[in-house]
Image (tube, rainbow, N blue to C red):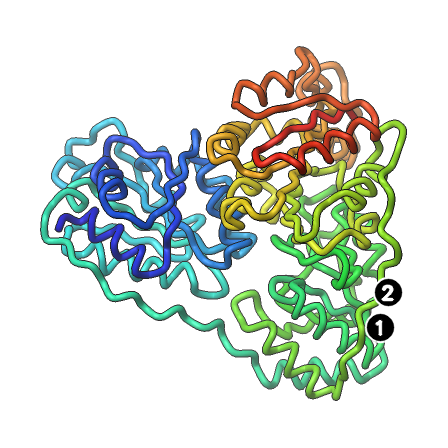
């Protein structure tokens, strides 16, 4: 058995049965092993940032890691932006990165790179397998690392001779590590804070914004009078009927500071202290009140559900029904606006849909208009590196085995970073509906330009404008094998959404906003 065969067999034995790939020469023995050994679903992406973004979306819905197949250091580099987003979202991924044969590397061939060094910036675990005999053992450790701390990125560098040499052995799967237990003193201190009557916020992230976590947090809030809010950078939030009507901490600095100003105490539940995405002249980096006391109930790597249960027990909090959000809205009419689009999505989305949200600036107010939608999962851009939305939706659809409708709320500028994901959606015949928000600009940067006190001149406007020439999204999607149509009104958008939901494959709506 060669190293590549031991790699595939150990991945399968460890529960990894999906591989998102963009292979090259150094990985041909891995590709051959995938061809010869049944059980691994292999999904081709046409650029590595699509591959890593799909693996992120897969974890967020499947709750287990997929592996990627990336071509040497430059292939890893192409996928780094979406690996950054995946790290911020707490997603578990096993990267398999090909490399030069160990005896060829000293000759410094063109693709030689500091692959391990590049991987460390986005990975919780990095290793290079130097011998075929080590590959099975190393990949078992990589899968275990991907499960660690509620999800982490593990990168295994695989020189081609370790792949093709004989001597490989299938490793025994390693146990998935449990998240770190909550700190009893942290629970006691949180209970003490919640009893003292001062204005208190429970800031929720990770497992706390999934259905079970929300129910526990609501019980605690009802027992104590505390407020609840979701961290802005959550990767995955359970939403719709039966879930809390949670607002996120606002993105805009002044709005965030105003929203948090009244809280004298903030209990962090799987969340980090709220800070601005960027620095602005004359404004603080932190969003909470200067005198606010912050307390960590659970870190992102800890068992947040256990911490919430312990806190509820310490407070004697009883079950409280989650409030009904009211009637489901009707689809909107007239010219598109953010509010009308959110209302229409809430009116029409199927039960248990998945929303991949890279609407960027256009969608910041979507939450309050979608509380009464059918129960669904909402996936966010957690790391701020744009170009994730379409690959994220693709990986999520594969994790759901094509049985759940995925709706991409996708800004036009960021879609150009990874539009190749549409090709994978077409090839895999995935039930993905993309609503392309076509405002013909990098609109978020227009706002950021003003936020630093500048007024765009001709040069700046040309750097932020996408309208000369205009991107033809109907033709771009068609070139990737995805059916598409343009909408200029909410009536047209609603009609196209309904049409797309009846189809098995992908569909793109070019919504002119």
- From the top left corner, tell me how far across and down residue 296 is, in percent: 64, 72
* Left or right: residue 370 compared with residue 271: right
Q: Residue at x 84, y 33 (%)?
A: 337
Whether 249 is drawn above or below 318: the answer is above
Disc 1 target residue: 199
- From the top left corner, tell me how far across and down residue 294 is, in percent: 70, 70
Regarding mark 2 in the picture, which secondary structure is present there? Answer: loop
Regarding mark 1 in the picture, which secondary structure is present there? Answer: loop
* Image marks 1 and 2: residues in contact by CB distance under 8 Å: yes
Identify the image quadrant of residue 23.
top left
* Left or right: residue 68 compared with residue 89: left
Q: Which residue occupies the extreme top position in the image? A: 469
Identify the image quadrant of residue 326.
bottom right
User: How far is disc 1 from disc 2 in space, using C-alphas?
Assistant: 7 Å
Label 1 vs 2, first from the N-terminus = 1
Asked if residue 199 can be seen in this view, the reply is yes
Asked if residue 119 can be seen in this view, the reply is no
Whether 242 is drawn above or below 297: the answer is above
Return the mark for residue 262: 2
- From the top left corner, tell me how far across and down residue 448 is, in percent: 73, 35
Of residues 157 and 38, which is closer to you in this image? Answer: 38
């Amino acid at each position: 058995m060669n190293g590549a065969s031991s790699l595939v067999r150990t991945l399968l034995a460890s529960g990894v049965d999906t591989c998102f790939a963009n292979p090259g020469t150094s990985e041909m023995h891995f590709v051959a092993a995938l061809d010869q050994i049944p059980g691994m679903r292999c999904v081709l992406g046409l650029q590595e940032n699509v591959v890593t973004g799909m693996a992120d979306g897969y974890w967020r819905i499947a709750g287990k890691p997929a592996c990627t197949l990336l071509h040497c250091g430059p292939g890893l580099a192409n996928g780094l932006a979406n690996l950054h987003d995946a790290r911020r979202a707490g997603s578990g991924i096993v990267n398999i990165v090909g490399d030069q044969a160990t005896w060829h590397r000293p000759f410094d061939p063109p693709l030689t790179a500091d692959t391990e060094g590049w991987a460390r910036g986005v990975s919780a675990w990095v290793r290079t397998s130097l011998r075929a005999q080590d590959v099975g053992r190393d990949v078992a450790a990589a899968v275990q690392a991907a499960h660690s701390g509620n999800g982490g990125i593990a990168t295994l560098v695989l020189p081609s001779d370790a792949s093709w040499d004989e001597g490989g052995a299938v490793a025994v799967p390693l146990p998935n590590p449990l998240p770190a237990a909550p700190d009893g003193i942290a629970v006691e201190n949180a209970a003490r804070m919640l009893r003292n009557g001062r204005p208190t916020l429970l800031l929720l992230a990770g497992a706390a914004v999934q259905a079970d976590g929300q129910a526990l947090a609501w019980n605690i809030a009802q027992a104590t009078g505390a407020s609840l809010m979701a961290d802005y950078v959550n990767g995955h939030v359970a939403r719709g009927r039966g879930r809390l009507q949670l607002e996120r901490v606002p993105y805009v600095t002044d709005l965030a500071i105003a929203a948090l100003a009244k809280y004298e105490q903030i209990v962090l539940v799987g969340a980090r202290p709220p800070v601005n995405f960027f620095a602005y002249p004359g404004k603080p980096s932190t969003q909470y009140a200067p005198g606010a006391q912050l307390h960590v109930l659970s870190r992102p790597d800890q068992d947040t559900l256990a911490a919430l249960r312990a806190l509820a027990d310490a407070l004697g909090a009883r079950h409280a029904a989650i409030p009904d959000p009211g009637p489901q809205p009707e689809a909107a009419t007239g010219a598109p606006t953010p509010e009308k689009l959110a209302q229409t999505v809430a009116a029409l989305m199927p039960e248990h849909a998945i929303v991949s949200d890279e609407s960027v600036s256009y969608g910041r107010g979507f939450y309050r208009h979608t509380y009464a939608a059918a129960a669904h999962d909402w996936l966010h851009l957690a790391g701020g590196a744009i170009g994730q939305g379409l690959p994220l939706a693709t990986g999520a659809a594969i994790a759901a085995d094509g049985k759940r409708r995925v709706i991409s709320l996708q800004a036009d500028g960021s879609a150009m970073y990874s539009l190749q994901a549409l090709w994978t959606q077409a090839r895999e015949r995935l039930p993905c509906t993309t609503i392309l928000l076509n405002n013909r600009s990098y609109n978020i940067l227009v706002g950021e330009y003003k936020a630093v006190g500048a007024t765009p001149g001709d040069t700046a406007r040309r750097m932020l404008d996408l309208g000369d020439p205009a991107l033809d999204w109907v033709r771009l999607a068609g070139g990737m094998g995805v059916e598409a149509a343009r909408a200029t009104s909410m009536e047209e958008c609603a009609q196209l959404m309904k049409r797309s939901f009846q189809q098995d494959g992908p569909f793109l709506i070019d919504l002119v906003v």
